[in-house]
Structure formats: C-alpha cells, structure tokens
Amino acid sequence: MADLPDALGPLLREAQARLAAAVDDPALDARLIVEHFSGTTRTQAIADPERKLGAGVVAEIDAALRRRAGGEPVHRILGYREFYGLRLSLSPETLEPRPDTETLVEAILPFVKAVAAREGECRILDLGTGTGAIALALLSVVPTANATGVDLSAGALATAARNAGQLGLAGRFTTLQSDWFEKVSGRYHVIVANPPYITTEDIGNLQDEVRNFDPRLALDGGADGLNPYRTIAAEAARFLETEGKIAVEIGHTQRNEVCEIFAAAGYVPGGAFRDLGGNDRVVVFVRIKP
C-alpha cells in the first residue's frame, strides 16, 4: 500500500482509494475513519484540505484502513455505533446494534409511555441486552422508566453498564448475568428481546462482517432459529405484570412460527411491525390473565 499523505484532503482521497475494492461504500467508511482518528469534520476537510495531521494520527488511520480492508466492520474499528440517536460503545461480546432493531423501540415505546404515565414508572426487562441498546433507547425517552438488562455474557453486561453510565442512565439501568430467566426475579410491565434467531446451519452463510465479528452466542438460535422464542414464551408469564407486553425482534421469515409459539403459551397478538426495508421485524404479545 502507498504511504498516506499527511494533508487532510489528499489523505481522505487516498483512504477512499484504498478501500474502493474492499467495501461497499468506500467514501463513507474512509470519511468515518479519518474523522474519528483525526478529530476533524467534513467541513474542515472541505475548508482546509491542506491541514496537516501528525505522524501518530496518520499511523492510526493507516492501521484502521488496513483493518477495514481486511473485512473488519467500520464500527468495530471506531469502537461505537449510533442507535436511536445514542452513541453506544461496542465490544467483542456484543452485537452491533442495527437500524432494524429501532423498529422494536418504536413498536413498544407508546406502551412504555402509557404505563409510565399511569403508574408513575414502567419496569422493563431486556433479555440478551448486549450493548443495552433497546433498554437504553427506551430509558432515554421515558424518564420514569427503569430497566434490567439480562445477558449470559459478563463482557456484554460490562459494555451495557458502561453505555448506561456514559449516557447518564446508570441510575435507572441494572445489569444481571443470567441464562434467560434463570436468575430473574420480580415482575415487569414490558419484556423486550432481540434474541439469536439465525439457524445453526445458516451461520456459515452470513456476511463475513457478521459471521466473523458478531458473537455467535448472539446469533445462533438453534436448529430452526426458534429456540429462544420457545424459552421466552414458556417462562415469561411469571415475570410479566397482568396486561404486560412482550416485544421480540424476529427474522423476516419467522412471523408465523413465532406467533404460533406465543399463542400456544397463552398470549394474544399485540401487533406486528416491519423494518425500513418492509420486512417483518417485530411482533408484540399481550398477557391478559395472570
């Protein structure tokens, strides 16, 4: 690879050229990397393209570009990703929160607001919390809500707790290391989850950026991809308030199967929601009787 220039404008152009054959959007990824490691903005690159960057900064950008060209996702390199207007730190133990999951936040948010207004609080249980994305997004909008983030991974829980602290939400967010409901206690108005829903067989067919960098624990839903939904449907009633709701993200072909699993466990459908691509992405279920 050619050496990177130390002037901001030429460096951006060379960064884009390096990524051109390796990624889908080399201009965006090059800009994200250069801006992050140089502390500059797009406006500065336009207004002052000859701005000099220090040798250490250029070396950091060079290393980051090599990682990106090697297939590592750009947000893994940056160490964070935006979700629902929040900047969330990532770690190897967490999924990257993705825009499709914002569908779940939007689907359940009106109910969270309504419960909080009526009860003075809304208790949320976030199963497989990862970065804390879903719970923290809800807490950021509803100031009287509180949440418990459950995960089997201690590393994921540390990341979620760090995100809560950075967002000023630590006082309303608790982490719990548990295999689904194993160590959960109390009752909640809302249970949310973006569970693993890829079939074990399909893991190998995922995009390299997902298969090689997202934790398998957060992807593998078993032989048919539905095992987590069976667990949630079978065990949630003990932890859900009367007329509480469950909202789960699903794979785009799983709506009927997931609805059947919850119907068999005594839940009533409370809505189905599509993501920005028009795919089935979230289903909500209501618990009517204790």
Image: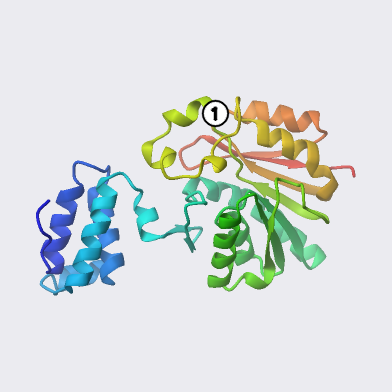
The quarter in which the C terminus is drawn is top right
Tell me the crowding category of disc 1: few under 14, some 14 to 19, or many 20 or more residues within 10 angstroms, Cα based: some
Q: Amino acid at mark 1?
A: Thr
- The secondary structure type at the circle numbered 1 is helix
Q: Quadrant of residue 172?
A: bottom right
Residue at screen point 55% across, 67% down:
162
- Asked if residue 269 can be seen in this view, the reply is no
Residue at the front extreme?
A: 154
Which residue is drawn at the image coordinates 23% and 49% (left, top)?
26
* Residue positioned 15% across, 68% down in the render: 8
Tell me the residue at 63%/71% (across/down). Answer: 170
Please tell me which residue lies in front, 231 or 267.
231
x and y percent of residue 93 in the render?
Answer: 52, 51
Q: In this picture, is 212 found above or below 79?
A: above
State left or right for residue 277 relative to residue 7.
right
Q: In the image, is residue 170 above or below residue 279?
A: below
Q: Nearer the viewer, residue 211 or 39?
A: 211
In the shown orientation, is residue 215 left or right of residue 23? right
Q: Give the x, y percent position of residue 72.
A: 34, 47
Q: Which residue is mark 1?
A: 200
* Residue at far right of view: 290
Does residue 235 appear anywhere in the picture?
yes
Residue 239 image point, x, y percent:
82, 49
Nearest to the observer: residue 67 or residue 275: 67
